[in-house]
């Protein structure tokens, strides 16, 4: 399976930090498990274009390029401590271990619950749901 589009291309920035609104994001240690999770999420009704796979290397490359793309307000906002900034640091540590990242658009509660369960069955961890104004740590 090839890498899918960059999440930052589709989603907003909140307080200077990448924020994939209405997405469940998880880290999966094994790429084969991540690909199996993506297949299962698709079978659960999430359209393929709403499921994203990124390698740790790709996440790090995106993170390195990201500061150059931010405006002054976004740079200032990134200095404010937040849960999103903490999550970013956790995800970067996982990316440095070349873990695989899976994100699925799941705006409805029942869909989100199905996606989270599927990701857990496929060894997903550091699972978060990014709502319109808050993120929720789901394990």
Image (tube, rainbow, N blue to C red):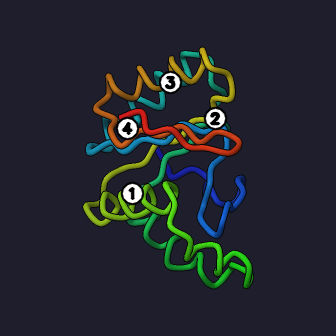
Looking at the image, tell me whether mark 2 or mark 1 is earlier in sequence order: 1
The label number, if any, that marks residue 105 in the structure image: 2
Task: Quadrant for residue 17, please give it.
Answer: bottom right
> In this figure, which residue is indicated by the disc labeled 4?
34
Q: Residue at x 32, y 28 (%)?
A: 122
- In whole angstroms, how far apart are the C-alphas of marks 4 and 1? 15 Å
- Residue 114, compared with residue 64, is above or below; it is above
Q: Position of residue 118 (x, y in %)?
A: 41, 22
Q: Mark 4 or mark 1, which has the lower sequence index?
A: 4
- Among the two numbered marks 3 and 4 on one chain, the one whose residue lies closer to the N terminus: 4
Q: Quadrant of residue 55?
A: bottom left
Q: Secondary structure at mark 2?
A: strand
Mark 2 vs mark 4, CA separation in Å: 16 Å
Residue identifier under label 3: 115
Tally of numbered discs: 4
Question: What residue would you read off at disc 1?
Answer: 91
Graded by Cα atoms within 10 Å as few (under 14), some (14 to 19) or many (20 or more), the crowding at tag 4 reads: many
């Amino acid at each position: 399976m090839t890498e899918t589009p960059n999440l930052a291309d589709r989603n907003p920035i909140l307080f200077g930090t990448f924020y994939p609104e209405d997405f469940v994001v998880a880290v999966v240690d094994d790429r084969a498990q991540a690909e199996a999770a993506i297949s299962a999420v698709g079978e659960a009704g999430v359209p393929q274009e709403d499921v994203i796979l990124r390698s740790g290397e790709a996440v790090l490359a995106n993170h390195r390029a990201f500061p150059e793309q931010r405006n002054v307000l976004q740079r200032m906002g990134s200095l404010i401590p937040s849960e999103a900034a903490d999550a970013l640091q956790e995800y970067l540590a996982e990316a440095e271990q070349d873990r695989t990242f899976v994100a699925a658009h799941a705006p409805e509660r029942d869909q989100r619950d199905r996606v989270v369960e599927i990701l857990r069955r496929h060894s997903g961890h550091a699972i978060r749901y990014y709502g319109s104004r808050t993120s929720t740590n789901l394990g």
